[in-house]
Image (tube, rainbow, N blue to C red):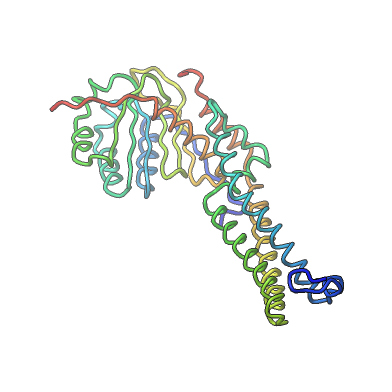
Amino acid sequence: MKIGGLKRNQLNMMNETEVIASTLVNFSTLGFLIIIGTAAFVPMVYDLSVHKKNKSVGIARFYPVRLISRLAQTSSVRFLMIISFLFILTGLLGLFFFYFENDFILTCALLLSIITISILLIFILYISIDAISIKKEELDEIVEYSTNEFYM
Amino acid sequence: MAIFNSMATEKTNTTETTKEKIIHLLNKSKEYVWMSTGLYPSFYNDTNIKKAMVDAIKRVKQIRIIIAGNAETKKTEVEWLFELENQCKGKLQIKQSERVPHWLIVDGKHFRLEKPHASDGVGVKNLFVTDVKQPVISDILEAKFENWWFKAKSIEHDE
């Protein structure tokens, strides 16, 4: 029996490189979906929460809020878009391997996925460390001066 | 590099130091200036303040000013600002609102926050915050100002 040009026993007996290519395609699809989802939804949710009436600067005391605010910045969104593009490229190279059966394409896909993951890791580390820096006393002063019930 | 640099805050308690710091903030402007003020004439007719504001208008893309209280009387008291608004249509926008805190926001990075005071005087208790690195602080302060801006009324101009 033939399925899409391949015999059933050919489907069952994928060689090692095909397994790697298949894993890469699945992995990059998942990566693309997660990253594009983060880039699309985090800024929207963050923006809605910031524009809530009488939101106090005091929420900056919480590390997750500072981290999400960093992630929602335009520069971060652009960066995540580039990462998701790299994931698409990795997936495509993985699919091309099945078509052309050229090991060089698989090597390129593997290298690209390593580069993409490394860049993503550095980015996550950067924003995680950057979100730590805040002086409690300075933040307290800002909260004190920006609280304006007197006017409302 | 932003890492491990937080921001700088400085309090002022006199009119002179407040004036100096406001000029300093205005001179830092590159993109936009948002200001809510009582437009106290003796303060805003000062030569140095006027120069800093005129220079800022030339430099930035947008200046929004919310005048707290009755803007009609200010038209004659701080005439130069309204003349400038006519000259720089669109770039300099002035609105009026009942009661808003007197803040100055420069490029979303530098802020002047003032404690509430009587409407017939200059507030002296100010906090100046420069180089805010955490976006959440800037975003919330800007969101508050935007809220006042959209609630504020336009000023009718004499033909």
Residue B154: horizontal and vertical position, in percent?
29, 26
- Residue drawn at 72 percent across, 80 percent down: A101
- Residue drawn at 35 percent across, 47 percent down: B27
Q: Nearer the viewer, residue A5 or A38?
A: A5
**Vertical side of B8 occupied by A91: above or below:** below
Q: Nearer the viewer, residue B59 or B15?
A: B59
**Vertical side of B153 occupied by B89: above or below:** below
- From the viewer's perspective, is B95 left or right of A72? left
Q: Quadrant of residue A47?
A: top right
Q: Which residue is the extreme one toward the front?
A: A1
Residue B58: horizontal and vertical position, in percent?
26, 48
Residue A129: horizontal and vertical position, in percent?
67, 52
- Residue drawn at 30 percent across, 50 percent down: B59
Q: Quadrant of residue B48?
A: top left
- From the viewer's perspective, is B70 left or right of A25? left
* Position of the N terminus of chain A by quadrant: bottom right
Q: Nearer the viewer, residue B113 or A27?
A: A27
Q: Nearer the viewer, residue A140 or A59?
A: A59
Residue B108: horizontal and vertical position, in percent?
45, 43
**Vertical side of A103 occupied by A30: above or below:** above
Numbered-mark total = 0
Q: Which residue is the extreme one toward the left?
A: B159
- Residue drawn at 74 percent across, 62 percent down: A26
Q: Quadrant of residue B149?
A: top left
- From the viewer's perspective, is A126 left or right of B25? right
